[in-house]
């Protein structure tokens, strides 16, 4: 069997032909330009490599997996691009389509760190944050699979990649995460020193100074770095609003409403799940009303919290 694979990135495309990770027969990398030019170069590469059995695409997003399209991407010219249909028409073979992070997750499950697992998640952190994964042997989509893209990191809190010109590494986030582990280690050592001290001179307490002082200094520096990171975050409010407005977020509310009316939860769950699967689900309320019911006045609570910490 001979397959084609495409890593369709926002700045570059990587195409390969082979039978598996240890059988790559040809590959090519080229920049992402217009949809017409990029898709044409992809089709030309596969055509010159002979007959294929199928092609798989892991694409930047957001995408509509069912329709085979890139949807509301900020990449100029790529909005609502019917990627699957165009390649399928050009090549005449089946074309599988998913997000780039889900494609990477599937690769890990077949040949990498997730071999033998049927439920796991795959997270990538770069200039944005992407998430994919598998649940019970099936790649996750819809509400349980956001290809996040909700925030961009500031360049002042990241560094460029030594290899990829378009990439930023989230140094502050990663270093603070590492320092958290160091702090936990110091805490464990301090607790061992003070555990079960006898009634004596307790000179062993001189060993508490180094971990305490070091933890204080690194916490102060980490907080300053995090302040730089957080203050420079840029949120994509349109994508956040679109995600928060998804009517399927209210499926649980619908099931709970049925329970309050006397339906057993297992029956309510199955009824609403059936509506979701068939595309017939219509919420009886909206997200704002649901939040008010569950959490009260969130804006007032957030203002009160800001006032406490001001």
Image (cartoon, grey):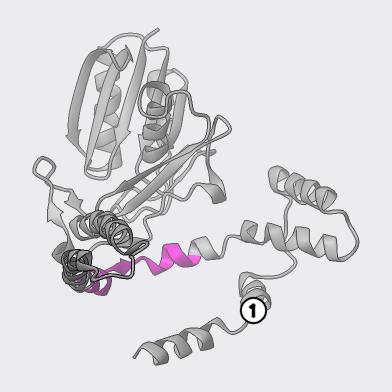
Where residue 8 appears, as percent x and y from the top left, is 31, 36
Query: Residue drawn 52% across and 40% down?
Result: 140
**Which of the 4 image quarters holds residue 255?**
bottom right
Q: Residue 240, position in %: x, y?
A: 45, 65
Q: Quadrant of residue 289?
A: bottom right
State the SS at label 1.
Answer: helix
Query: On screen, 96 above or below 190?
Result: above
Q: Does residue 57 show up magenta in the picture?
A: no
Q: Nearer the viewer, residue 119 or 48?
A: 119
**In the foreground, 176 or 4:** 176
| Closer-to-camera residue (40/50) | 50
In terms of image quadrants, where is residue 254?
bottom right
Give yes or no for residue 235 being in the magenta stretch: yes
Q: Which residue is mark 1?
A: 292
Question: Image quadrant for the C terminus?
Answer: bottom left
The residue stretch that appears in magenta = 225-241
**Compared to 83, does 256 lie above or below?**
below
Q: Kindly identify the residue that appears in the image at 25 percent across and 50 percent down.
A: 126
The N terminus is located in which quarter? top left
Tell me the residue at 38%/40% (across/down).
101
Q: Residue 90: percent from the left, percent from the top?
A: 38, 23
Residue under the point 66% across and 70% down: 286
């Amino acid at each position: 069997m001979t397959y084609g694979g495409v890593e369709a990135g926002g700045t570059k495309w990587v195409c390969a032909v082979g039978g598996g990770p240890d059988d790559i027969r040809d590959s090519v990398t080229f920049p992402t330009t217009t949809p017409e030019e990029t898709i044409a170069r992809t089709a030309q590469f596969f055509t010159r490599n002979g007959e294929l059995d199928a092609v798989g695409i892991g694409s930047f997003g957001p995408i509509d997996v069912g329709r085979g399209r890139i949807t509301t991407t900020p990449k100029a010219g790529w909005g609502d691009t019917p990627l699957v249909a165009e390649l399928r028409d050009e090549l005449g073979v089946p074309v599988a389509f998913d997000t780039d992070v889900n494609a990477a997750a599937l690769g890990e499950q077949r040949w990498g760190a997730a071999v033998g697992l049927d439920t796991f998640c795959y997270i990538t952190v770069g200039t944005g944050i992407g998430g994919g994964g598998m649940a019970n042997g099936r790649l996750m989509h819809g509400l349980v699979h956001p290809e996040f893209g909700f925030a961009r990191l500031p360049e002042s809190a990241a560094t460029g990649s030594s290899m990829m010109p378009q990439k930023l590494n989230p140094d502050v986030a990663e270093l603070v995460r590492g320092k958290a582990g160091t702090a936990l280690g110091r805490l464990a050592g301090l607790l061992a020193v003070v555990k079960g001290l006898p009634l004596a001179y307790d000179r062993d307490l001189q060993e508490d100074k180094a971990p305490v002082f070091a933890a204080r200094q690194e916490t102060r520096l980490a907080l300053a770095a995090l302040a730089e990171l957080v203050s420079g975050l840029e949120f994509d409010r349109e994508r956040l609003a679109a995600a928060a407005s998804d009517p399927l977020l209210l499926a649980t509310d619908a099931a709970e409403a049925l329970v309050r009316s006397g339906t057993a939860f297992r029956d309510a769950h199955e009824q609403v799940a059936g509506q979701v699967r068939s595309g017939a689900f219509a919420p009886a309320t909206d997200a704002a009303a649901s939040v008010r019911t569950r959490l009260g006045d969130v804006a007032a609570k957030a203002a009160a919290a800001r006032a406490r910490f001001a």
